């Protein structure tokens, strides 16, 4: 049987089999029923006509105007950069001093903008906040995760006193809340102690947020079921299966969080080995 041109199933007599039966239609050919027998015959497909090319939507005058505008913009950019190029009679020290004076206003504006941005420690810091493990700044993301910044600071101080004391790191007072603010000249052991404190806090944050999310998810599903029962006289099998799938989704999320906890544990082991292995200091 061969599918005809008009969607009907057609048959034709195969010259190899000597009877009506299915045949093979070569690519690029089509079938059509004959006028007398109604059987399908193989015909050469009509050649496809190429699609006309889309005409250009701009006139030559408009294209020329755009070319002139682009040349003017490039020349303006070149003139702006000429003041920052090194002169032929200027040595390296003088050139760098002049360049520093020229970019000083831009650097000041960048520092002030960065300080204003980092000063925002409200919940608006992380608008797409999920579990808080990938937040680069634990101090600024504390409000978004429902934590107290003072608790984070005291946790870092306790890590410095206990773990740092075991590693022989001198207590230099309260540690900064983020690694970005720690001086680059700080000892490597002190940085490892601070990194251990961050890893421990991220694990605590994950478990805290997971408990809060599960509590709210269960309450939402049960409230949804209570509203449905108020509008229906009896509980149906379909609604019961839906409730089971919703609760199963809440419990299955624990498996995902356990994978993240395993990643944090491996990071903790690597930092602990680097801190208490004198060969790596």
Image: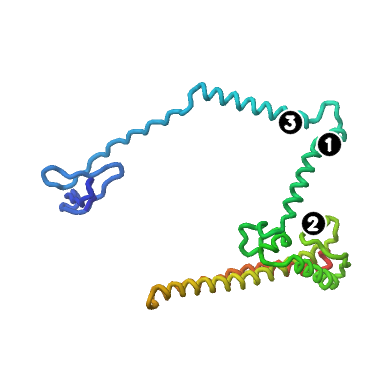
Residue 27: image quadrant is top left
State how far apart marks 2 and 3 are (Cα).
Answer: 33 Å
State how far apart marks 3 and 1 are (Cα).
Answer: 15 Å
- 97 lies left or right of 223: right
Out of 190 and 65, give the one closest to the viewer.
Answer: 65
Figure disc tally:
3
Residue 97: image quadrant is top right
User: Disc 2 or 1, which lies upstream in sequence?
Assistant: 1
- 58 lies left or right of 33: right
- Pointer 2: what residue? 181
State how far apart marks 2 and 1 are (Cα).
Answer: 26 Å
Out of 40 and 188, give the one closest to the viewer.
Answer: 188
Residue 81: assigned label: 3
User: Disc 3 or 1, which lies upstream in sequence?
Assistant: 3
Across and down, in percent, residue 265 comes to 69, 70
Question: Mark 1 and mark 3 in contact (Cβ < 8 Å)?
Answer: no
| Residue shown at the point (74%, 50%) measured from the top left | 116
| Residue shown at the point (46%, 28%) measured from the top left | 56
Out of 278 and 173, give the one closest to the viewer.
Answer: 173
| Residue shown at the point (85%, 34%) measured from the top left | 92
Across and down, in percent, residue 172 comes to 88, 64
Q: Which structural element holds mark 3?
A: helix
Residue 101: assigned label: 1
Above or below, comparing residue 238 to residue 105 in the picture = below
């Amino acid at each position: 049987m061969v599918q005809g041109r008009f969607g009907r199933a057609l048959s034709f007599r195969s010259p190899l089999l000597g009877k009506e039966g299915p045949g093979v239609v070569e690519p690029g050919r089509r079938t059509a029923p004959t006028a007398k027998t109604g059987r399908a015959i193989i015909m050469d497909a009509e050649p496809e006509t190429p699609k006309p090319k889309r005409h250009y939507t701009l006139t030559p005058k408009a294209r020329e105007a755009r070319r002139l505008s682009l040349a003017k913009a490039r020349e303006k950019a070149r003139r702006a950069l000429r003041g920052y190029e090194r002169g032929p009679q200027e040595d390296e020290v003088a050139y760098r001093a002049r360049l520093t004076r020229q970019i000083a206003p831009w650097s000041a504006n960048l520092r002030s903008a960065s300080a204003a941005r980092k000063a925002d420690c409200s919940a608006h810091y992380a608008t797409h906040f999920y579990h808080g493990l990938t937040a680069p700044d634990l101090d600024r993301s504390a409000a978004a995760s429902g934590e107290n910044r003072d608790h984070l600071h005291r946790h870092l101080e306790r890590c410095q006193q206990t773990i740092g004391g075991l590693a022989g790191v001198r207590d230099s007072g309260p540690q900064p809340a983020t690694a970005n603010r720690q001086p680059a000249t700080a000892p490597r052991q002190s940085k490892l102690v601070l990194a251990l404190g961050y890893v421990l806090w991220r694990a605590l944050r994950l478990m805290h947020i997971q408990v809060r999310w599960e509590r709210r998810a269960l309450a939402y599903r049960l409230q949804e079921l209570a509203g449905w029962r108020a509008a229906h006289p009896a509980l149906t099998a379909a609604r019961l299966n839906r409730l089971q799938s919703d609760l199963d989704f809440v419990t299955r999320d624990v498996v995902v969080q356990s994978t993240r906890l395993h990643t944090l544990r491996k990071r903790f082991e690597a930092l602990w080995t680097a801190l208490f292995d004198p060969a790596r200091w």
